[in-house]
Amino acid sequence: MPLSRSLSMTSLSGVLPAWEEDELPVEDLLLFEVAWEVTNKVGGIYTVIQTKAKITVDEWGENYYMMGPYFEQNFKTQVEGCEPPNPAIRKAMDALIHNGCQVHFGRWLIEGSPYVILFDIGSAAWNLDRWKGDLWQTCSIGLPYHDREANDSLILGSLIAWFFKELTDNLGDKPNVIGHFHEWQAGAGLILSRSRKIPMATVFTTHATLLGRYLCAGNADFYNNLDKFNIDKEAGERQIYHRYCLERAAVHCAHVFTTVSQITAVEANHMLHRKPDVVTPNGLNVKKFSAMHEFQNLHSTSKTRIQEFVRGHFYGHLDFNLEKTLFFFIAGRYEFSNKGADIFLESLSRLNYLLRVHRNDVTVVVFFIMPAKTNNFNVESLKGQAVRKQLWDTAHTVKEKFGKKLYDALLTGTIPDMNSILDRDDFTIMKRAIYATQRHSLPPVTTHNMLDDSTDPILSNVRRIGLFNSRNDRVKIIFHPEFLSSTSPLLPMDYEDFVRGCNLGVFPSYYEPWGYTPGECTVMGIPSVTTNLSGFGCFMEEHVSDPAAYGIYIVDRRFRSPEESCNQLTQFMFSFCQQSRRQRIIQRNRTERLSDLLDWRYLGRFYIHARHLALSRAFPEKFKMDPMAPLKVSNTVQTRD
């Protein structure tokens, strides 16, 4: 099946202006990228800026800097302190330091090793009341004293605006400065920089609108009512009006406004009242293997490790064939409705019914990797892994004795009586091991002790649909309410290795501005389910002629009712269960071929376009822009009847 666009360096050039191929004179420019998640992992923005660093450093060299808040532990473990190479930056930092505000400089120890400038919020907190007054005088936005996150973002923004003022004063007319701000937490710095008329080009990127996330989490019929919401009223009722004002002010102050997907562009136009100038899809650093079969080998190795965990978790109830067991998973922030966990659980109940009715010999083990409040590992889960290890040790002990006696018998030229090779003690050891695997309870659904067991959304729905890992269930559920780690005593695997070992990632999100999880699956050659309400799903629909043939199953949640979407998801999973092993291998090869579409080497061009546009608007006398049509961004969304 052909791709609708060639997977080459020109695959995206058709939607970029012709002048885009020209290089910016980066030696005359300084690029600063500002985000709360620089060296500070909170969510998906961390992945964006971390993975994009390499291609940006390749383009800008020592003229590229990241800016964010200083956290001592993060700085010690992720940053190598050094002196700034640019004297103007050193002077700007000293100006803040001499006024009692701590600023730290170094190289972030990630691929590309970009420079980072980190501002210590605590050292400048004594200025908070004065800076709140400045914000009120500037744009009539007031911040409540109890919102710690908003107050911290104002301190960070004030320090950054102060820094840019000192920097541009030191630089004079040349070089020019570009500031790229991500999300509302960095928005205060953009607002203050523009209000003080600091000579710099600004770009603001929203990865998800604040109010959109809140409304979808509250089960609102969001996309069919985009033009009907009373924005101010909705933000006020959720006590985020001041945050919304910061976000909206930053959007309107920026020279260029960008967002990460077409679906979020439509949302931003209604929620923030500005149509994005550029859509900048999120990419990944794609590492291609020299041999095609290498990623298939990695899948096999990681799958074996997951099978070992499953053997322990289901001890005493392991009456299904692991060679005919498929591993599905959903992962990400614990937003039950936004991430589609609700529709996923309902579909699993229907899938279980279909597999039982059709007497299918496939078993599906489903992992929910979503962090929730716990107090420790589940004792039964830990015991399962201990029992598995004990059985493994017993089997190896008996195997060694068996092998030695068999070897001795063969040396004498006789075929031994198998009953004589194993003595009574060996049978006793094996019987004791078998008895140890007996359990009178069902395998646990969750691997940890949940603090809110009775009200937890996933567990409440598991009780409703009745999937308790019983013997006659063909769908088994394991809820791992903690991010994966190779140091875990229960499931010692990093997330990347775990994904490689699974057969299908399922992410039927209702609200997903981009969606890194299916993108990561694609890069690793693992098929995935997404929706046409996620940025990733829309991107794949636009660029691939038949996504399902390449292992990208797109559930229609925009034009179908929840019931129809649930049935469609069930059918996708049931069809996947009916595939042969050979068909799954072929599909993984096809999925991995799509990884070029998600490479920052291609998608980084949209960021280049945004910077060109910002410079042409901020310094029109210095930077001319070819009068070409901007990147197309639809400002309407069709809604189902």
Image (cartoon, grey):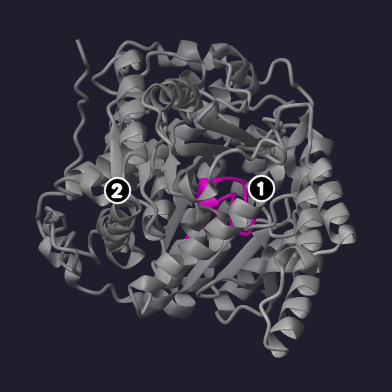
Q: Is residue 32 magenta?
A: yes
Q: Residue tagged by mark 2?
A: 551
Disc 2 packing (10 Å; few <14; some 14–19; many ≥20): many
User: Which quadrant: the C terminus?
Assistant: top left
Relative depth, front residue between 89 and 243: 243
Mark carried by residue 311: 1
- What secondary structure is marked by label 1? helix
Relative depth, front residue between 483 and 224: 483
Residue in view at x 39 percent, y 21 percent: 357
Q: What x and y, as percent, mark residue 352? A: 46, 25
Relative depth, front residue between 504 and 22: 504
Based on the displayed image, in which of its 4 quarters is residue 108 positioned?
bottom right
- Residue that lies at the very extreme toward the right in this rendered image: 425
Q: Is residue 113 magenta?
A: no
Amino acid on which disc 2 is placed: Gly
- What secondary structure is marked by label 2? loop
Residue 271, above or below 51: above
Residue in view at x 69 percent, y 51 percent: 491
Gap in angstroms between the C-alphas marked 1 and 2: 28 Å
Q: What x and y, as percent, mark residue 139? A: 50, 31
Q: What x and y, as percent, mark residue 224? A: 29, 15
Based on the displayed image, in which of its 4 quarters is residue 454 positioned?
top right
Amino acid on which disc 1 is placed: Arg
Disc with the residue nearer the chain's start (1 vs 2): 1
Residue in view at x 38 percent, y 23 percent: 354
* Residue stretch in magenta: 31-46
User: Which quadrant: the N terminus?
Assistant: bottom left
